[in-house]
Image: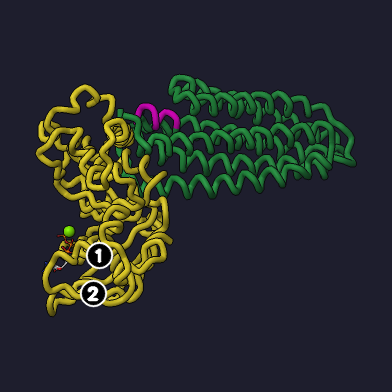
Chain colours: A yellow, B green
Amino acid sequence: MIVETSHLNLYYGSFHALKDIDLSIKENLITGIIGPSGCGKSTLLRVFNRMNDLIRGVRITGAVLIDREDIHSPVCDLILLRKKVGMVFQRPNAFPLSIFDNIAYGPRIWSITDKKTLRDIVERSLAAVDLFDALKNRLKESALSLSAEKQQRLCIARLLAVEPEILLMDEPCSSLDPIATGKIEELMLVLKRKYTIIIVTHNMQQAARIADEVGFMLLGELIEFNSTKKIFTNPSDRRTFDYISGRFG
Amino acid sequence: MDRHFDEELQKVKKNLLEMASLVEESITKALEALKKKDLKMASEIKEIDHRIDRFEIAIEDQCIELIARHQPVGTDLRFLIGVIKMNNDMERMGDHAVNIAGSVAFLIEQPRIKPVSNIWSMASEVKEMLKDSVKSFMDNDAKKAQQVCARDNVVDEMRDETIRILLTYMLEQPDKIGSAIPLLLVAKNLERIADLTTNICEDVIYIAQARVIKHHAEEEKG
Ligand SMILES: Nc1ncnc2c1ncn2[C@@H]1O[C@H](COP(=O)(O)OP(=O)(O)OP(=O)(O)O)[C@@H](O)[C@H]1O
Ligand SMILES: [Mg+2]
């Protein structure tokens, strides 16, 4: 288990957004989190790299272990945690910098300045998202000149540059068309060989296609967590079935 | 774009082809055991059949999972539906091989009778049909599949002739009834295998061309 929570509760002020969540996420799998809007998917994802710390009034109880380490313990190094657990957002958030500098951004924060090392990291990271051949002669161009799909790939490459273990993805394809979505999904299937991926998606077909295990959330509760096959052929909870069969949600 | 899903479909196809070769092996071996009156060889068919049964369950499971997870459309959907049906038909062919092998025990003490040669020609026609139907699936070749279907009549005629000859034999030489009845059953089982190979071919045509040819559906639509 690379990520484990037990009795995880999260409150936004008095609003109880995550309710007693027990979850175990395995290494080198794609775990999908599905559920209707407002059920707490993004909130849960943000717990894993403590992005909720940035929101005022948030209170968390229970335990969250990553690599068996309690991420809320005072000795947990937040910078290291965010390096280890990277996040890809709904809209590609490429920086208004060159393609090269986008990728080199993270490593530079980690004080890597050697030109050759940086070039190697940029090449490796772009190659990992299958962009290197397309972009190797355009590294000085602005990242914002790329298509949405390529920008999303670039954002993933930027994460890979700091050698994370876990990739959190919050609806990474929702601003992409079906073809671009298909390409990002194929990329995820390649990336899972090296990384653990947790993806939140509104699109349950996407979870069905690419996830190995799926969690279904409803009103802050984790209703069911099972293999994708089980969830989509014979879910244990009636509410899961109602949701995936389009009976509500 | 090569999709992960296409690889999954290829795996299904590979499994079905593996199962088909087990079915061929099982039928061939059952007939060989019959020819040699070899009880030991006949007893091996059961083991092959268990393996066929395991394939059937695994392939069906794979297809259901792919349908649930990928919501296939068009040719992908027809492929998976077709495979589910072929899977079922192949498993039944395996059962017919078990039946044929079961006849060996009844023949062992019996004298050899002449009509047995009809059985061998039927058997070789049926084996050819099976081989060609599997090949048509492998190559997604609707034309070849259509040709196999046309041969079903030949086998039906061979069966009718075999039954006629065997009946005459039994009437004329009641002491040969013990030899003739197991052969009647073998003829029946061979004919059923031929029917099932035409089912496979109908599915190949359905997958390749989205045409339903069984029960002369197209002629009726007119
Ligand atoms: N910063 C915040 N302050 C207060 N309430 C919040 C905050 N962020 C989210 N919430 C509430 O918490 C609940 C869960 O929100 P969250 O964004 O995690 O849902 P979600 O499942 O990701 O929804 P969607 O599918 O729409 O993205 C919602 O009711 C939401 O209104
Ligand atoms: Mg959200």
Q: Quadrant of the N terminus of chain A?
A: bottom left
Residue at 62% from the left image edge and 33% from the top image edge:
B21
| In the rendered image, residues at marks 2 and 1 fall on the same chain | yes
Taking the image in four quarters, ligand 2 sits in the one at bottom left
* Front in this rendered view, residue B11 or B138: B11
Q: Are marks 2 and 1 in contact (CB under 8 Å)?
A: yes
Residue on which the image places disc 2: A60
Q: Is residue B13 above or below residue B146?
A: below
Residue at 54% from the left image edge and 41% from the top image edge:
B89
Subunit of label 2: A
**Magenta stretch containing residue B205, yes or no?**
yes
Task: Tell me which segment is drawn in magenta.
Answer: B204-210
Q: Quadrant of the C terminus of chain A?
A: bottom left
Q: Secondary structure at mark 2?
A: strand
* Front in this rendered view, residue A53 or B42: A53
State the CA–CA distance, disc 2 to disc 1.
Answer: 9 Å
Query: Which residue lies most toward the bottom here?
Result: A14
Residue B37 position within the rendered picture, expressed as x and y whole percent measured from the top left: 84, 36
Q: In the rendered image, which quarter is residue A37 located in?
A: bottom left
Residue on which the image places disc 1: A47
Residue B147 position within the rendered picture, expressed as x and y whole percent measured from the top left: 50, 20
